[in-house]
Amino acid sequence: SHSECQSNDEETSSALSKARDQAWSSTLDSLAPFIQFNGGMGTGGRSREVINGTLNTLTLRYLGISKSVMAPKDGKPKTTQFTRINDTIGIGEMATEITFHSKLASALALSQFHEKMFSKEQTSILSDTIYSILQSPWFSHCEAGCLLHNSIASSTNLDSNKDDSHPFFVKYLPFIISIFEKPPICLLLKENATAHVSLDDSNVQSICDNGLAMLFNSSLNCSSEDIVHMWQKIFTKRGISFENLRKSSKKSLTTASMRLSASISGAVISCGSKHLPPKVTPLIRALMTSLKNEESHSRRIETCRSISKLVSIL
């Protein structure tokens, strides 16, 4: 019957996911002796270069950005190009479901990479990346930042810090909380007809993705603020002012705003009781709206997890 086939498909998918996660964990464990043999994670070491390069590539891929190196041509040096990847599998809601589930798995994989390769360091490039993409013009990047933060925060006991801060999260935690007071720019752009055209423009995407990639090039010394400012300038040149959008914004409930609000709520809650805002009503409202209206099974599960976490820390 159809129900039996669906049950078998879910069991097969679960088994494959478990095998994939075990393989990834074993791969990370196998890198530890290699790093120690080559002098550890000290600055300037070859191991550091390889690990950082791998993390950078995986992070860009997580954001749906492909990095390719073009061979030298006509006497010109080799160049690096960044292009958007269409990760969609299937059609309609099924495609959305699979894409989100894939994002969750990728966020977990990146957080494990961070935990095992950078556990002795106070911060890493992922911290700056999350801070940047939370302010990205694209909804998918902003949501990906929330999911990645959730995965890393879930393995970090923030409530154990005596100074109420953690070096990895201290830079962007205030920004996450502030989003409840003013909508993120990605939603304002998505709901603006003129801006929406620029969001779909491959040239705009390429320029902005090249800018984000500069964050991973240590020789350029680019900060998160530099990247966000560059994005803003690109849209300003196309007649789209972030400042004007923020001034004229009106709160409206859309599928995108509902989903991002739920993800942001989960991000705040994952930081622990010490980092909850004075009023948790906006968090609860966002989660209950998601629980009531969300059609995606995977997203509802994440919402339920956030509600459970919130109840446990209140």
Image (cartoon, rainbow, N blue to C red):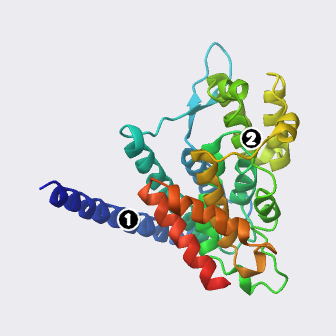
Q: Which residue is the site of mark 2? A: 214
Which x, y percent locates residue 222? 82, 45
- Kindly indicate the quadrant of the structure image that contains residue 199: top right
Q: Are marks 1 and 2 in contact (CB under 8 Å)?
A: no
Label 2 CA crowd tier, 10 Å (few <14, some 14–19, many 20+): some
Give the farthest residue toward the left.
1
Q: Quadrant of the N terminus?
A: bottom left
Q: Residue at horizontal 58%, vertical 71%?
A: 306
Which residue is nearer to you in this view: 289 or 34? Answer: 289
Q: Is residue 180 above or below residue 71?
A: below
Q: Residue at horizontal 51%, vertical 70%?
A: 304
Which residue is nearer to you in this view: 76 or 162? Answer: 162
Which x, y percent locates residue 313? 66, 84
Residue 39 in view in this figure: no
Which x, y percent locates residue 21? 40, 65
Q: Is residue 206 left or right of residue 95?
A: right
Q: Residue at horizontal 72%, vertical 24%?
A: 194
Between the C-alphas of marks 1 and 2, the distance is 31 Å
Q: Residue at horizontal 67%, vertical 29%?
A: 196
Residue 94 in view in this figure: yes
Q: Which residue is the site of mark 1? A: 23
Q: Amino acid at mark 2?
A: Met
